[in-house]
Amino acid sequence: MQCPFLNRFSANYLRSYAEVLYQSYGTFCPVVGKTINNAAEKKLSLTTSVQFSTMATRSYSTKSYSVDTNSSMYDVRGDHGNAIAAADPNSTFHYEKFFNAQILKKKRDHSYRVFKRVNRLAGDGLFPHALEYSAQTERPITVWCSNDYLGMSAHPNVKRKVKEALEMHGSGAGGTRNISGNSLHHERLERKLAELHEKEGALLFTSCFVANDSTLFTLAKLLPNCHIFSDAGNHASMIQGIRNSGVPKHIFRHNDVNHLRQLLQQVDKATPKIVAFETVHSMTGAICPLEELLDVAHEFGAITFIDEVHAVGLYGDHGAGVGERDGVLAKMDIISGTLGKAFGNIGGYIAGSSTLIDLIRSYAAGFIFTTSLPPTVLCGALEAVTILASEEGRQLRSLHQRNVSYLRNLLLREGFPVEDTPSHIIPIKIGDPQKCTQISNVLMDQFGHYLQAINYPTVARGQEKLRLAPTPFHTFEMMNVLVTDLKKVWDMLELSTNVPLTPNGCMFCNSDNCWHKDNSPDLECGIPNCPRLEISVAA
């Protein structure tokens, strides 16, 4: 007769988690429990003490865990991949035990990730809705955390271009750019991106992670005696490229111009230097003092590498990013951007001088030795870039900023801990990974809102948050429902007792008694030049 508990799991799962299941549930099993009791009576030790040495910087601390090892002793070390070495010189490395131990560490500190099973919808009028399958049943939800900021993945013209490319060229690129993978579509998109950023050239990569990693690594290795100055808040892709290059690096405080100056002063002006930073921070929503950072870098003879990933498509008259908005494109030496966020496709790129682009094209392994982007992506991305550089793009950006302002003001008015940010990203500070995940799960399971919990390692421990990214297609009604449901979840989880369930006050001036409320009771918007406000004033 099969065990009614164990037969629910696959053989691979049981092999990997047998020890955990045995220790956690063995005593409750009428069969295994007898074995445990008999062993206890005979005073047989079924577990051994395993010493986990965890390296923190240059010091070691020791923790003891109880693991059933069948009388074998293991030494689990925190250095160089946390290698598990068997005490018996004739035994082999226990890979599955090691893998399982690493996963359990993630689960214990609540940084283990469980992906939501979500199919976004792109039919007419369906964005930003989706179908969710986490509970094994299909149900509709509203997505609030996508980086498809302007809904370009669902734009009818973008979809049409993708479909045409698929019918004409097929689904794949065919190879690297050097071996049958280069096309007119690659070159057209690169020219368009160079034009967008007012540069001589641009170069496409399979992702912006690869673009950042490959460019910084290659440039730092080629420049003689190069030093890199990196913002403390830089993305993992930039950090990896800098770290792998092995060149001397200097970390300046996030968006701190004076600290950057102090560090630059310590290196000879004639030494090649790269200053790398982001314009819009992906998690905090902060926008850097761009021109000041550029001026300080150039004052000390550095070349600048600016990540505009969360800004392209969203800022500037043509959607070229914060650099265009602030009128400093000419001062930016190397710009990296993505096709996978506001442009609604996938892939990354850099833009800069023709010589710089040719250098990276010729030396960067991340560009040379990988299959190029397929025609479907290239044609869809080119259409998206073109749309967002047009009047339609300017209208979308205006609606986007309107909705961001409305939702941020509504959340602030209702007492939620919204972090102050000047960008389109709205972070709600939680500071606890378990609570953050709970909020996200309840919102999804009970109210149909997909709002992803952001935990370590995406953010530092203690900085856990919910990250909202409203689009031009989230209506006022949808945002009102979200905030109402969020307050219910806050109450259910007892996160705060001073967040009212009934909205009060005016969204425009954030006070209970005001001209707007008395003369326009249905006013629900804190947006400058709001049509409702203008109508009420005209009346």
Image (cartoon, grey):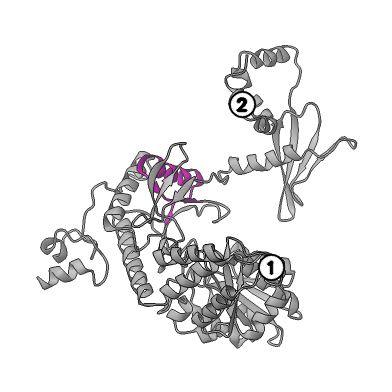
Identity of the residue drawn at 40% across and 69% down: 422
Residue 451 part of the magenta segment: yes
Q: Position of residue 111 (x, y in %)?
A: 57, 46
The disc at residue 24 is: 2
Q: In screen coordinates, is 465 left or right of 221?
A: left
- Give the residue type at disc 2: Ser
Quadrant showing the N terminus: top right
Q: In screen coordinates, is 528 left or right of 20?
A: left
Report helix, strand or loop for mark 2: helix
Query: Residue lying farthest front?
Result: 168
Residue 283 makes an appearance in the image? yes
**Which mark's residue is nearer the viewer, 1 or 2?**
1
Q: Position of residue 533 (x, y in %)?
A: 18, 68
Residue 325 part of the magenta segment: no
Quadrant hosting residue 145: bottom left
Identity of the residue drawn at 59% across and 40% down: 108
Residue 233 makes an appearance in the image? no
Q: Which residues are magenta?
A: 427-454
Q: In screen coordinates, is 254 left or right of 536?
A: right
Q: Position of residue 259 (x, y in %)?
A: 57, 75
Residue situated in front as seen by the camera: 153 or 532 = 153
Q: Is residue 107 above or below residue 381?
A: above
Q: In screen coordinates, is 454 left or right of 56?
A: left
Q: Is residue 258 above or below residue 480?
A: below
Residue situated in front as seen by the camera: 102 or 166 = 166
| CA distance for labels 1 and 2 | 51 Å
Quadrant showing the C terminus: bottom left
Count up the numbered dots.
Answer: 2
Q: Position of residue 283 (x, y in %)?
A: 49, 61
Q: Is residue 13 above or below residue 503?
A: above
- Residue position for label 1: 176
Report helix, strand or loop for mark 1: loop
